[in-house]
Image (tube, grey):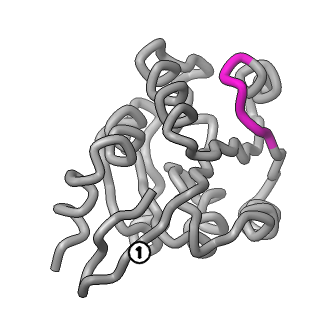
Amino acid sequence: MLINGPNNEIIDIENIVVDLNGTLANYGIVSNKTKALIKKLKELDYRIILISGDIRGNASVIAKDLGIELLLGENSNLKAKQIKMFNPQKTAAIGNARIDIGTFLNAKLSIATLQQEGIHTDIIKYVDIIVPSIEDALNIFIDTKALEGTLRI
């Protein structure tokens, strides 16, 4: 999806990498609204990839239910290595924890979500955008004018 970025830069996002716990799921549960947004993004030809430390042990069940790819990443360095398998210049990363810094550093666009499980303050300097929820993060790839407005200089 082409997005008008700052200084007339065209940002072409094809892949959205999401963290699981505290991001895609809150307390282990993915909301129905989030499920619908994932489905819509897939219909818009975004590739959705879940890279998770899988602290709750339910990542494979959630990925299968959503029909998205899953990679397990037990730490930030491994997550950084995994996101590089996708074209970083065409990839956005969404997360909330220190373990996500590796994905943030290797994505064209990085988004932090501040939800029920919290946000780690170390990630603030690595993200482009902070939103209140995963639904808000996913919606900005559907309504790209919102994303363009946030990125505008």
Q: Which residue is pictured at 79% across the width and 19% down the height?
A: 61
Question: Disc 1 marks which residue?
Answer: 125
Q: How many marks?
A: 1
Report the amino acid beneath label 1: Lys
Outermost top residue: 32
- Which residue is at 60% across, 54% downward? 15
Residue drawn at 58 percent across, 75 percent down: 89
Compared to residue 69, the image places residue 60 above or below, namely above
**Secondary structure beneath disc 1?**
helix
Name the quadrant containing residue 121. bottom left
Q: Nearer the viewer, residue 151 or 113?
A: 151
Q: Position of residue 2 (x, y in %)?
A: 40, 63
- The correct choice, above or below, for 4 with respect to 70 in the image is below
Residue 7 placement, left or right of 138: left
Q: In this view, does 20 lie to the left or right of 139?
A: right
The part of the image, by quadrant, that contains residue 104 is bottom right
In-image side of 33 versus 71 (left or right): left
Q: Where residue 151 sits in the image (x, y, percent)? A: 25, 69
Q: From the image, which quarter does the N terminus lie in?
A: bottom left
Instruction: Determine whether 2 is above or below 70 in the image.
Output: below
Placement of 122 over or under 28, stated as above or below: below
- Residue closer to the observer: 38 or 135: 38
Residue 125: x and y, percent? 41, 74
**Image point (71%, 17%), residue name:** 65
Q: Are there few (<14), some (14-19), or many (20+) residues within 10 Å of tag 1?
A: few
Q: Quadrant of the C terminus?
A: bottom left
Q: Percent x, y for residue 52? A: 73, 43
Q: Reply yes or no: does residue 69 show up in magenta.
A: yes
Observer-nearest of 32 and 13: 13
Q: Give the range drawn in magenta.
A: 65-70
